[in-house]
Image (tube, rainbow, N blue to C red):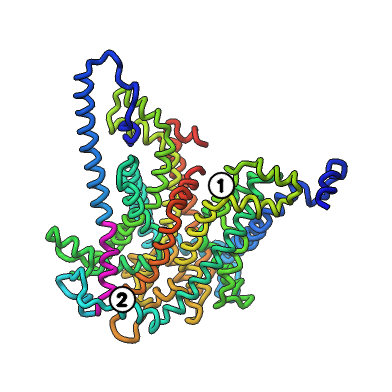
Amino acid sequence: MQDVLDKPRSGDVPPAAPAARTATVRRRRNSRARWELTARITALSLFCLLLLFPFVWLVSQSLKDTNQYFAVPFEWIPSPFRWENFTDVIFKYEFLHYIGNSLWLAVYAVVVNILSSSFVAYGFSRFRFPGRNALFMVVLATMMLPGQVMTISLYRFYREIGWIDTFYPLLIPKLFGAAFEIFLFRQFFLSLPREVDEAARIDGCGTLRTWWHIILPQSKPVIIVVAVFTFLGSWRELFGPLIYLTGEENRTLPLGLLYFTSPFGSSLPMLMAAIVISLIPPVVLYALGQKYIDKGVAIAEIK
Amino acid sequence: MSMVSAEQRPRLKRRWWRREGVQGYLYISPWLLGFLMFGVAPLIAAFMTSLSKANVFRTIRFVGTDNYEKILTDDPVFATIAGNMLIYVIGSTVISICLGLVLALLLFKDFRGNHVFRTLIYVPSLLVGIATAYLFKQVFRGGEVGLANMFLSLFGTEPVNWLGDSEKPWLALVALILVNVWFAGGTMLIFLAGLKGIPASYFEAARVDGAGPWQMFRKVTLPLLSPVIVFNTVMALIGHIQVFETPLAFANSGGVATGNPLGYENSLGTFVTYLYVKGFVYQDMGYASALAFIMFAATLVLTGLVLWLARRFTAYGDADQN
């Protein structure tokens, strides 16, 4: 909040003020600023510690056997480490298969969503047509609709046409773009200079080629943001898969977690290992796209 | 070829599909089609279903507003759930907004390490889902093994049976609300963007006029941030009303998907888990559709309430931005 105040200010001090007094004022102000900064950092550190604890606890518990898991007092560093938990979860508990399903669904969602949403956003940002603003308001309004309202009738429809326990109910709707992503792309496209597309048009470049060769190559930041958000959304989606995918063969990672049971006795450390595995890709992805994501979230605020 | 057509263009009437308006519609047509097929059509169908008795396979008969009447007047489970939701949504939204705002204010200053804090706070909100739901289920486990109880024992508190106390089933709801402390990063980031959008000169002017930190917050930051606060509040409300994974995971017994998915004495029932149970466990599609519309109505009412309150209590910020 006081960010602005502490930046060096030239010309702030009236020339007539006695030098000694200014120095005292500045020193007082400096010590106050330093105290405030310490308080800030302390508060943030304590809060981050609180945030991190469950995750550190999780990793610790995922490397134990059942006896160690329930041991009191708690052991933060397990001895011995049971790395087998991870290999067991992946190979014996079929998680390799679930990860495969989730991964290809997520990659498909990313590719298709970038193409379809940017295509639609291009229409909204570069063409004038009657009802454009009203339709865009509808796009935004659909974000408020709870997906569950539609799920029930969609479920019955998919059952009718034999799509239950196939991936189609998760794949096909993605072809038509997603509201939030259309919104992000549109905001970004509006910020791109129109002169470049107009120059392309004068050179005889059609609108489709303009989208593909001119607009998209300039849109790396927003593409990365949409890619990360879409991947995360698909990776953690539970409600859709839970309803549409009934067989074990088609389980995604969240379903694998939900139905996590052990044929080999108590399985909590294994469950913890499975959780660690499912949290790794989002963290890695965030780390890769971080500098773009912070800005991408800020776009949402413009609304 | 393209050169020729480019030269001729001014004289020829452009082909109809080249017109700007038509092209615009062509580009947005995928969304329009998807909206009609996966939005409007199922919405209408769901509304029809909500007025009928229906199972998974077919609509059996039209029953008018029977489902709605039953839910609102004659369903003790729904009454419990509506109470849960009121507490949960208010509690969680307060956490998301207040904590998010405090964190954003703490981070709204350049200092070394700012970036690290911001990342640490934001990342958990990307992880929310069934995985973190099961993690927090173990964190709020009863006895001395649960992390929450380990933490409380530092202050000499007896272990709390968070999720299975038959005397105090509301403890489970408290745990469910507390989980949101870990996911305030999303609102924090939007608040931070909002703070950065306030012109520095406003703070400067207030400081020159002798405003202290509290006055500055109350008279400058808060009014200018109010559109962002409203946006965040509405988004948080919508998100919290649709909470699903965490209550479902908390209600399961062990790590297994069994037991009452609504929790002990339905203390963990939410709109979506109840809808799931009614529609896909008991396969009463008419009832579940009516539940979905009631949930939607609740969303609209709460959103409207927030917007109304915002209009009443913000002097100018709102009018400025819209």
Q: Secondary structure at mark 2?
A: loop
Residue B177 locus on image (x, y percent): 32, 58
Q: Residue at x 59, y 63 (%)?
A: A112
The answer to whether residue B154 is left or right of residue B181 is left
A198, above or below A17, in the image: below
Please check whether the numbered discs 1 and 2 fall on a single chain. no
Q: Nearer the viewer, residue B212 or A88?
A: A88
Amino acid at pointer 1: Phe
Q: Residue at x 27, y 66 (%)?
A: B139
Amino acid at pointer 2: Gly
Residue A178 locus on image (x, y percent): 57, 57
Q: Which mark is residue B97?
A: none
Q: Can residue B148 be seen by looking at this rendering? A: yes
A99, above or below A281, in the image: below
Q: Quadrant of the N terminus of chain A?
A: top left
- CA neighbours of label 1 inside 10 A, class few (<14), some (14 to 19), many (20+): many
The answer to whether residue A42 is left or right of residue B88 is left
Q: Residue at x 30, y 15 (%)?
A: A15
Mark 1 and mark 2 residues within 8 Å of each other at the beta carbon: no
Q: Which mark is residue B254?
A: 2
Q: Residue at x 43, y 67 (%)?
A: B274
Q: Secondary structure at mark 1?
A: helix
Q: Can residue B92 be seen by looking at this rendering? A: no
A86, above or below B234, in the image: below
Query: Bounds of the magenta span?
Result: A50-65
Q: Is residue A51 magenta?
A: yes
Q: Nearer the viewer, residue B65 or B123?
A: B123
- Classify residue B43 by image quadrant: bottom right
Residue B267 locus on image (x, y percent): 33, 65
- The residue pinned by badge 1 equals A188
